[in-house]
Image (spheres, rainbow, N blue to C red):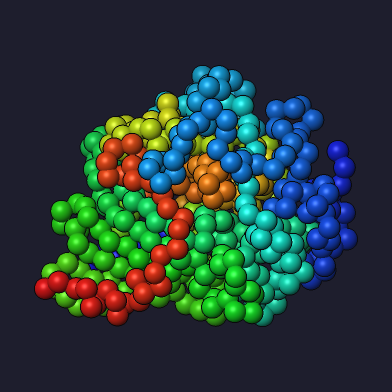
């Protein structure tokens, strides 16, 4: 039976607070910082001393001047197409930029002549005011599950649960991972995506689907008290490849899997029977990715965090993919070249990132023995992840794209590319592109609650 994933879907600074060593994870951070030295999301408002990272001034909350874009008709355009490239990094000059590159990025450059094109930095992340209000409330109302962040958290709603990470590096490591899980992509979302693997140097369509999401954690009229515990519900209908066309699934992704386990059901075309699927977690290989991605690798890190110790290593400037709307202008298959996703369509920028190292918790196992995770300070998304096997050899390299949707508003997750650095294989995990039907516009309008019920899927089954 096929299994599918539902994740396709200077002044006072945080560093100064961390460096003081005066606050443990149980102490109360100062929410007023979110209106002064920190942004409403918890990042530093100021730019860097070199001027290569600008100050945050509110983000992209409206379609920029000069663009006639109708969100109901097309995917968003590349709002920074007129920017001139600053420089290119490849194997010949990567030593010059080594401190700005992850080990995975450098390994792909050495192994496959991968390169990146670097452009001016734009801090575009923005969210509605009601989310900013919730983030401020989360500063003091979010608590660890049973006193242990390995098991989850409680009390947060409608925004990043930990906008001001703890001074305890172990607590902060988990908190930052939870912020990534709670990334903002709208209260509802409807989109069409495709997944490509690469076989013998040729792109192969592994999955094509239309998806509907309802984010229970991000309902404007909801509260922490009424939050049902499931971060989102998803309904999926596959239309490709031919062997999967007509298959359907619904699922619930838990915001706290220790207290509320994930649930999912599937309907295989022609069988007319809805089955509840096993709860696939951790290092179980995902469907449609040639075994390149495990379930706990979606979005950099996903699902329960109890198998690792996550330790914050600090904050640094780093080159990461960002403001990647240009990807929407390329045809899906053509973007998947023999060795890597086409770098000509990927914009890289210099941003500050939180650096978190994951090592196996005593007595736990995972095929990925160590991981390095890099989270953008503004949207808290894990933008790059490197992973090593038990022998200490780098195995996996993954980077994510963040696209601009000023109609939401938000600079949000749009796709990710994962590489097996030992075999040379790679996979994209759910993107939208210029070729139909993958160019259908994303909608953030409400969708009916009924479509997320397995009973509704069963009632619509064909035999």
Query: Is the C terminus in the top left, top right, bottom left or bottom right quadrant?
Result: bottom left
Q: Residue at x 50, y 49 (%)?
A: 413
Q: Position of residue 111 (x, y in %)?
A: 42, 31
Could you tell me if residue 294 is visible in this image?
no
- Total marks shown come to 0
Residue 348 image-quadrant placement? top right
43 on left or right of 77: right
Residue 325 versus residue 415 in the image, above or below:
above
| Left or right side of 262 for 128 | right
- Compared to residue 10, the image places residue 219 above or below, namely below
Q: Is residue 458 visible?
A: yes
The residue positioned 61% from the left and 44% from the top of the image is 61
Question: Residue 38 at what x, y percent from top left?
Answer: 78, 49
The quarter of the picture where the N terminus appears is bottom left
Which residue is rendered at x = 34% and y = 71% of the image?
Answer: 451
Q: Along the line of sight, which residue is nearer the eye, 370 or 351?
A: 351
Query: Relative to residue 56, is residue 273 depicted above or below?
Result: below
Spot occupied by residue 218 in the image (x, y as percentages of width and height): 56, 65
198 or 416: nearer the viewer: 416
**Quarter-wise, where is residue 438 in the image?**
top left
Residue visible at 73% across and 53% down?
40
- Where residue 306 sits, quadrant-wise, is bottom right
Image location of residue 281, percent across then percent down:
43, 68
């Amino acid at each position: 039976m096929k299994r599918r994933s539902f994740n396709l879907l200077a002044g006072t600074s945080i560093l100064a607070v961390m460096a003081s060593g005066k606050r443990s994870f149980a102490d109360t951070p100062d929410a007023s910082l979110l209106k002064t030295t920190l942004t409403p999301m918890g990042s530093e408002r100021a730019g860097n001393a070199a001027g290569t990272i600008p100050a945050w001034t509110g983000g992209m909350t409206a379609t920029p001047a000069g663009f006639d874009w109708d969100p109901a008709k097309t995917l968003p355009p590349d709002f920074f197409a007129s920017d001139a490239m600053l420089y290119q990094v490849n194997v010949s000059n990567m030593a010059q930029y080594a401190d700005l590159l992850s080990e995975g990025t450098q390994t792909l450059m050495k192994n496959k002549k991968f390169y990146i094109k670097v452009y001016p930095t734009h801090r575009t992340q923005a969210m509605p005011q009601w989310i900013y209000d919730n983030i401020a409330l989360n500063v003091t109302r979010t608590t660890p599950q049973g006193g242990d962040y390995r098991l989850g958290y409680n009390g947060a709603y409608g925004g990043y649960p930990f906008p001001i990470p703890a001074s305890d590096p172990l607590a902060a490591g988990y908190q930052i991972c939870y912020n990534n899980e709670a990334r903002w992509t709208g209260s509802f979302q409807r989109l069409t995506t495709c997944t490509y693997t690469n076989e013998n140097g040729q792109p192969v369509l592994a999955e094509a689907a239309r998806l509907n999401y309802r984010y229970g954690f991000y309902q404007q009229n909801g509260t922490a008290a009424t939050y049902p515990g499931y971060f989102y519900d998803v309904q999926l209908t596959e239309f490709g490849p031919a062997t999967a066309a007509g298959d359907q699934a619904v699922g619930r992704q838990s915001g706290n899997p220790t207290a509320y386990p994930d649930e999912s059901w599937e309907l295989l075309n022609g069988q007319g029977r809805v089955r509840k699927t096993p709860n696939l977690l951790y290092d179980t290989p995902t469907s449609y990715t040639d075994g390149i991605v495990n379930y706990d690798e979606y979005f950099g890190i996903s699902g329960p965090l109890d198998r690792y110790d996550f330790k914050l290593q600090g904050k640094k400037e780093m080159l990461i993919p960002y403001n990647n709307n240009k990807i929407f202008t390329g045809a899906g298959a053509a973007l998947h070249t023999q060795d890597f996703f086409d770098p000509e369509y990927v914009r890289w920028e210099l941003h500050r990132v939180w650096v978190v190292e994951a090592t196996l918790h005593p007595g736990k196992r995972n095929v990925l023995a160590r991981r390095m995770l890099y989270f953008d300070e503004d949207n808290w998304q894990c933008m790059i992840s490197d992973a090593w096997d038990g022998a200490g050899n780098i195995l996996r390299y993954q980077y994510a794209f963040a696209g601009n949707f000023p109609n939401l508003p938000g600079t949000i997750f749009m796709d990710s590319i994962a590489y097996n650095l030992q075999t040379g294989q790679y996979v994209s995990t759910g993107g939208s592109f210029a070729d139909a039907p993958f160019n259908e516009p994303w909608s953030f309008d409400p969708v009916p609650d009924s479509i997320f019920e397995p009973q509704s899927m069963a009632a619509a089954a064909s035999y």
